[in-house]
Image (spheres, rainbow, N blue to C red):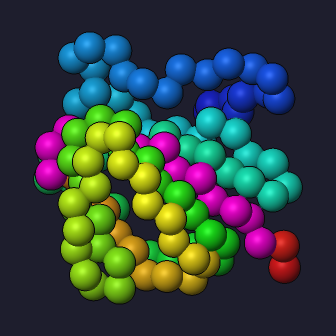
Amino acid sequence: MALPHASPGQIVDILSSEGTLPSAKSFALFKSDQLEVMRVVLPAGKAFPPHRVAGEITVQCLDGRIDFSVDGVSQELRAGQLLHLEGGVLHGLVGLEDSSALVTIVLCKP
């Protein structure tokens, strides 16, 4: 069963409760015609393999530390930091410790 997306104007909690991050799940917060926002959870050592999305993205690390690779070059994204990528850029993520991030994707119309 799919999780419901937030409705316009609805407040959504995106931070983990104390001690719940390792068992938390990734989920889409909302999706519209032009924008998708997700909370991605990366336990320590878990990888989100290199991939591309058509539209621009932002990734804001909420908790922990993430090894974020862009075109094969790794950098560390820490809680409180934000990264922006143009569409079509190859990128991947690995949790260096239990981590979560807020990911925003601009959806390109075909």
Q: In the drawing, does residue 5 fall left or right of residue 90?
A: right
Question: Which secondary structure class fits the magenta region best?
Answer: strand
Residue under the point 23% across and 39% down: 64
- Residue 44 image-quadrant placement: top left
Q: In the drawing, does residue 66 fall left or right of residue 109?
A: left
Task: Specify the farthest residue to the top.
Answer: 18
Q: Position of residue 17 (x, y in %)?
A: 34, 15
Residue under the point 25% across and 81% down: 73
Whether residue 94 is visible here, answered yes or no, is no
Q: In the drawing, does residue 64 fall left or right of residue 2?
A: left
Whether residue 14 is visible here, answered yes or no, is yes
52 part of magenta stretch:
no
Height in image: 103 above or below 63?
Answer: below
Q: Position of residue 34 (x, y in %)?
A: 81, 58
Q: Position of residue 84 (x, y in %)?
A: 50, 65
Q: Position of residue 49 (x, y in %)?
A: 33, 70
Q: In the drawing, does residue 19 fall left or right of residue 2?
A: left
Q: Nearer the viewer, residue 3 or 100?
A: 100
Height in image: 22 above or below 83?
Answer: above
Number of numbered markers: 0
| Image quadrant containing the C terminus | bottom right
106 part of magenta stretch:
yes
Residue under the point 75% across and 20% down: 10
Write down the region rendered in magenta.
96-108
